[in-house]
Amino acid sequence: MTWRTVKQPADAAAPEELFTGQWQNRPSILDDYKPNLDDRWNEGCTNAWKLRQETVPLGYKGSYQRVRAYLHKKRTSPRPEAARPPSPRTVAGWILRRPETLPEPEQLLLKAVRTHCPETDALTRHVRAFAVILTERQSERLPDWLVPSGRTICSVSIPLPPASTATAMPSSPVSPCPGAQAQSKATSTASK
């Protein structure tokens, strides 16, 4: 080995200086078509053969292997992680909790969800109005809450009972569970 062979790596201040040579940073026949290939790649087309066939009518005269090698770099490079949207369970948890107890990052995420989805925003306001009715014991506001005046909470229409029947209490204590009614009848006849 000659002294010149050893001198070049010894004099390099950074490893990048060693990557110079006749094959580095040369213009490629593919350079003019890379923007088109990048656009198609970002659209979801990852088939090198198909992309080469689409590039030939644009004037590309190179080989399939060159396109494949260029796309191989894209396949093996790390992709940026896209932020996943919050799950419906997570959003429901944010809506059902008191707004002042939510940490700031969760408040910002809920605000973003409410901004992008008007139905979720209307639902959040409706749930929070109900929470105020419950916590401040304002039962007189319940009929107005049950039938919102001219507002839709959701794009799906759900028939609500009339306000007069929604707040009316049954005359006798009836359990909403049929099994509980049968059990209470059985215990009352057994005690006689």
Image (cartoon, rainbow, N blue to C red):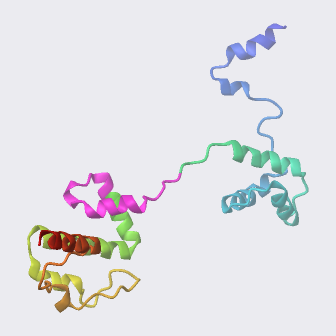
Residue 43 location, x and y as percent?
67, 63
Q: Is residue 165 left or right of residue 12?
A: left
Residue at 36 percent across and 85 percent down: it is 158
Residues drawn in magenta: 82-107
Where on the picture, by quarter, is residue 143? Answer: bottom left
Residue 77 location, x and y as percent?
66, 43
- Comparing 129 with 48, the one in front is 129
Where on the picture, by quarter, is residue 109? Answer: bottom left
Residue at 81 percent across and 59 percent down: it is 51
Residue at 32 percent across and 52 percent down: it is 105
Looking at the image, is 31 positioned above or below residue 94?
Answer: above
Q: How many marks?
A: 0
Quarter that holds the C terminus = bottom left
Residue 35 location, x and y as percent?
72, 58
Q: Is residue 89 left or right of residue 136?
A: right
- Comparing 116 with 58, the one in front is 116
Looking at the image, is 7 positioned above or below residue 115?
Answer: above
Specify whether residue 87 is painted magenta: yes
Specify whether residue 131 is painted magenta: no
Q: Is residue 37 left or right of residue 135?
A: right
Looking at the image, is 140 positioned above or below residue 100?
Answer: below
Residue 115 location, x and y as percent?
37, 70
Quarter that holds the N terminus = top right
Where on the picture, by quarter, is residue 114? Answer: bottom left
Which secondary structure dominates the residues rendered in magenta? helix
